[in-house]
Amino acid sequence: IMLSYLLPLLLTTIILLHSHVLRCEAFPVAAWRAEFFLSSSAMERHLSTVTSLHVHTEDEHGDFFDVEAARRQLEMLVTGGVSEGVNNKEEQQAPSRSGFSAVVSPARERGTPLPEMPTLDVTLPAPGPLTTIERERRLAEIQLLSQLDEGDESLADVWELWFSERGPQAAALLHKADDLMNEGPDHFPEAERILRSLIEDFGVHFAEPLNRLATMYYLQGRMEEALTLNKMVLSVKPWHFGALSHIVMVYAAIKDSQHARQWAAFRLPNFSPGKENKRRIRWVERAVSEATMLLDQRQEDTNKSFGNTDDEWISDQMQMRNVINDNDDDSWQ
């Protein structure tokens, strides 16, 4: 009798507690992490971080996320399922043939998207086939870019990589031109000759000669030429933090405050030790994502022209062999 009395009361209590959890509107921004969404043990960590909840939660960048989506997410966690917005961990990552993945923050996905860069009104010839050496250098560049959310230590390595993208001889000439520019206007003609020669020899997809020439033209007051070269650099490397900073200076010099403000939002934010540096982290995420996507596109274009890489061909052959072996095993049965 006592059990029959207590059981309905216990069930009612559980239902009320369950309903109370489902009425929670949102998580703190810091609690949203895709890797927690799929395990039952993660539910306890999420519930322990729920604080005073509001209709919307806004971070320091003015980003909002959908409270209804948060409610559905919590409900699926409680019931052991997977929400509509996050089917699995893989859907939170953009697959990449280069080995890097652009992770999409769930809060960012539901909030205001990152602004698009202003249109670059320049047209460059298509780059040549992606060589193995160029691919390895681009992968190293992506790796160095990814370290910029931890500080400025890798900045010098990024610059040196950009200088050496066409080998040690081209890098030596670039350093010589840079030294001539630092010696003053009397040496600008010789520096320009070297930079133009590098552009002629290696093409416009070797971005650093373009960047150095743009800097020299700015110092000479040749603003329209400097602006065009900056746009060319950013067409090749949208994450080139030198060109992103310099194009703002050029627009400011020609009194185009509208474009100067637009481009200022894309400069590499300063890193402040001991602070969260969220703007810097977001810049790095975007740079890595763009560099990875462009590398994948180059690889795809090269494959269309020459076929798959050796590694991909070997992988395909192994898969075919496994299929044949499986069929042979079935035939004996």
Image (spheres, rainbow, N blue to C red):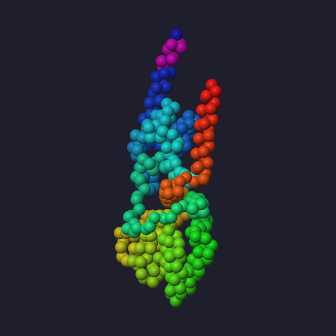
Q: Is residue 77 magenta?
A: no
Asked if residue 32 is positioned above or below residue 198 in the image, the reply reads: above
Q: Residue, x 50% and y 14% (percent of image)?
A: 5
| For residue 310, side relative to residue 219 (left or right) | right
Number of callouts in the render? Answer: 0
Q: Is residue 168 visible?
A: yes
On-image quarter of the C terminus: top right
| Position of residue 7 measured from the top left corner of the image (x, y, whole percent) | 51, 17
Asked if residue 220 is positioned above or below residue 207 in the image, the reply reads: below
| Position of residue 110 measured from the top left corner of the image (x, y, whole percent) | 42, 47
Q: Can residue 181 be seen in this view?
A: no
The picture quadrant where one finds residue 151 is bottom right
Q: Residue, x 42% and y 81% (percent of image)?
A: 222
| Position of residue 127 measured from the top left corner of the image (x, y, whole percent) | 49, 65
* 229 or 28, nearer to the observer: 229
Q: Is residue 8 magenta?
A: yes
Asked if residue 21 is positioned above or below residue 116 in the image, the reply reads: above
Asked if residue 167 is positioned above or below residue 316 in the image, the reply reads: below
The stretch of residues the image draws in magenta is 2-9
Check the image and name the residue furthest to the top.
1
* 81 or 181, nearer to the observer: 181
Check the image and name the residue furthest to the bottom.
186
* 195 or 289, nearer to the observer: 195
| For residue 235, side relative to residue 154 (left or right) | left
* 67 or 326, nearer to the observer: 326
Magenta: main secondary structure equals helix
Q: Residue, x 63% and y 35% (percent of image)?
A: 325
